Amino acid sequence: MTDTPSLPEGYEISTDPARVDRERVHRWLSTDAYWALGRSREKQDRAIEESLNFGAFDTVSGEQVAYARVITDRATFGWLCDVYVDPSVRGKGVGSALVAAVREELRSFGVRRVLLATQDAHGVYEKLGFAPLERPEQWMALIFAP
């Protein structure tokens, strides 16, 4: 059984795309996330518009403190990406609770498979039920040059 971390007191999670602080998310990702360095604001806004978005927010200030995005058909498949937790709240469990909320939302849709790619957070995701691909030789990728 995987952990189901609870959200620390003083924070809430929302999937309301209107609550996403687009400027903050763009700044986080384009300047501090190895996978999205230099991503344009236009591209980030388009990604937000075409995805299922999750935000963690401070309940007093309303300030967004974490973000996760899922590319999904809400039926069979999801790709978890752009998970970012503001440095000021790292280590408090906000990120783990956010990913657990993503997991449960996708489970409620009946999604069977959720993928993600990470360079350095395998242990974090393993605690939430993610595992290496059983048969990576079956998977392929089409990568376009920048």
Image (cartoon, helix red, strand yellow):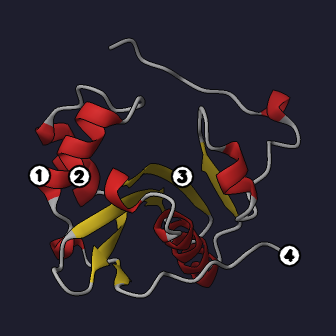
Q: Nearer the viewer, residue 115 or 125?
A: 125
Disc 3 secondary structure class: strand
Left or right relative to 72: residue 41? left
CA gap, disc 4 and disc 3? 22 Å
Given the image, on which type of amino acid does mark 3 rest? Trp
The residues tagged by marks 3 and 1 sit, at their Cα atoms, a distance apart of 23 Å
Query: Given contact means CB atoms under 8 Å apart, are the residues at marks 2 and 1 in contact?
Result: yes
Q: Identify the residue at horizontal 35%, vertical 51% (top origin).
A: 87
Please tell me how crowded label 1 is: few (under 14), some (14-19), or many (20+) other residues with Cα within 10 Å. few
From this view, report whether residue 120 is shown above or below residue 126: above
**Is there CB contact under 8 Å for labels 4 and 3?**
no
Q: How many marks?
A: 4
What residue does disc 2 label?
A: 25
Label 4: which residue? 1
Residue at 62 percent of width and 65 percent of height? 76
Drawn side of residue 122 relative to residue 137, left or right: left
The mark closer to the camera, 3 or 1, is 1
Which numbered tag is attached to residue 23?
A: 1
Sequence-earlier tag: 3 or 2: 2
Q: Which residue is mark 3?
A: 79
Residue count near mark 2 (Cα–Cα under 10 Å), binned few <14, some 14–19, many ≥20: many
Q: As shown in the figure, which amino acid type bears the numbered disc 1?
A: Glu
User: Residue 37: where, in percent of width, then height?
Assistant: 30, 27
